[in-house]
């Protein structure tokens, strides 16, 4: 029977450490660390995500603000808002809630967020830093997956890691993080041949696809660590991952559930990134940040 990695417990513990670091920051600098979220349009799911992020910030003793623009906002208007946040000293982290309305150039908007305030880790400069092994801000979801693997005591050095999905926000940074820890990494995607056999060769299998229960027991090596990033809603309205949890749990070495696995880590890591960004911007000694 696999060890079920409880993301809620790991995330709660991380949030306690983040809150302590945020209090330390506020005491040293004389203001709270601050996260500003840009929300364009009225997508219902985005409204909920943004509200949850704001609440989590406040619970950790950080300042948070939501900047709303109408769904028909012009590119120049969105960029001007971000430019204002870049110029504001109290703003440590800026997050642009995705997806943006179709008429906007998403990449141009994201590139406007300066690397030092880019708490999503999407700026090319942070992406480059990750692949070069330099210090930077790392995307929250894959960073949360690494924390879950470490908490479960999964050995990464020399392990064979297979990451299914190659998005810029999950798959690619996940592969970079596993490589950084000396795993031997293969990235799979929709054009990969013989995906089942490839997955079955993994010691560490990360699924970030968005297809309900596509990974069954036959795709998982006995004893492997399985991290399920996928969030899918079934016809009955139930949330399930990319992994068939019930089929795999008796067989894997460790596994994250959906919900309650990777999801809670993403927000906790966003808070962590905000404190990291604040700490660095204030020029505080790196070794004294206690997260
Ligand atoms: P995405 O941008 O849509 O990328 C999906 C990836 O899966 C693509 O690389 C695609 O390959 C690959 N893929 C699609 N069908 C496949 C197949 N049949 N076999 C193998 N690979 C296939 O998605 P994403 O943003 O990375 O998100 C992935 C999942 O994670 C979604 O369910 C999303 O909701 C979830 N997610 C969860 C969190 C969290 O906090 N828990 C955060 C972010 C995302 P191609 O590149 O070839 O098209």
Image (cartoon, grey):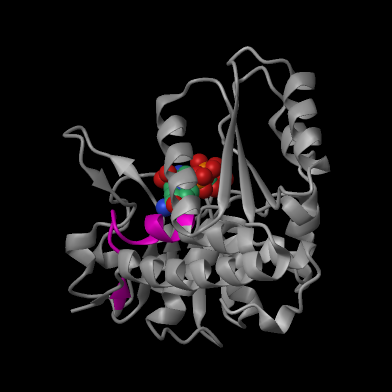
| Closer to the camera in the image, 62 or 8 | 62
Quadrant containing the C terminus in the rendered view: bottom right
Quadrant housing residue 76? top right
Residue 24 x/y as whole percent: 61, 72
Residue 88 x/y as whole percent: 78, 43
Residue 74 x/y as whole percent: 72, 15
Vertical side of 123 occupied by 10: above or below:
below
Q: Is residue 176 visible?
A: no
Q: Is residue 97 left or right of residue 259?
A: right
Vertical side of 173 occupied by 10: above or below:
below
| Closer to the camera in the image, 146 or 172 | 146
Quadrant containing the N terminus in the rendered view: bottom left
Span of residues in magenta: 254-267
Magenta-drawn stretch contains 162:
no
- Who's the residue at 57% across and 80% down the image? 183
Q: Is residue 76 visible?
A: yes
């Amino acid at each position: 029977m696999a060890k079920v990695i409880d993301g809620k417990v790991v995330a709660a513990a991380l949030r306690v450490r983040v809150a302590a670091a945020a209090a330390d920051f506020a005491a040293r600098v004389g203001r709270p660390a601050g996260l500003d979220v840009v929300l364009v349009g009225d997508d219902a799911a985005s409204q909920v995500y943004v509200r949850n992020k704001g609440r989590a910030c406040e619970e950790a003793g950080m300042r948070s603000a939501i900047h709303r623009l109408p769904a028909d906002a012009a590119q120049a208007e969105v960029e001007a808002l971000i430019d204002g946040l870049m110029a504001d000293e109290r703003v440590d982290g800026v997050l642009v809630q995705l997806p943006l309305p179709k008429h906007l150039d998403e990449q141009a908007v994201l590139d406007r967020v300066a690397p030092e305030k880019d708490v999503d880790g999407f700026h090319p400069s942070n992406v480059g830093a990750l692949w070069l092994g330099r210090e930077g801000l790392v995307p929250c979801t894959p960073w949360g997956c690494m924390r879950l693997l470490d908490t479960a005591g999964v050995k990464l050095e020399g392990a064979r890691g297979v990451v299914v999905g190659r998005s810029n926000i999950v798959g690619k940074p996940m592969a970079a993080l596993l490589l950084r820890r000396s795993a031997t990494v293969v990235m799979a995607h929709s054009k990969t041949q013989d995906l089942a056999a490839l997955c079955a060769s993994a010691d560490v299998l990360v699924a970030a696809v968005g297809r309900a229960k596509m990974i069954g027991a036959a795709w998982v090596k006995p004893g492997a660590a399985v991290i399920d990033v996928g969030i899918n809603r079934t016809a009955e309205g139930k949330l399930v991952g990319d992994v068939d949890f019930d089929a795999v749990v008796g067989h894997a070495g460790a596994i994250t559930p959906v919900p309650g696995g990777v999801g809670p880590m993403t927000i906790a890591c966003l808070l962590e990134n905000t404190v990291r960004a604040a700490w660095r911007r204030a020029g505080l000694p790196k070794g004294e940040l206690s997260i």
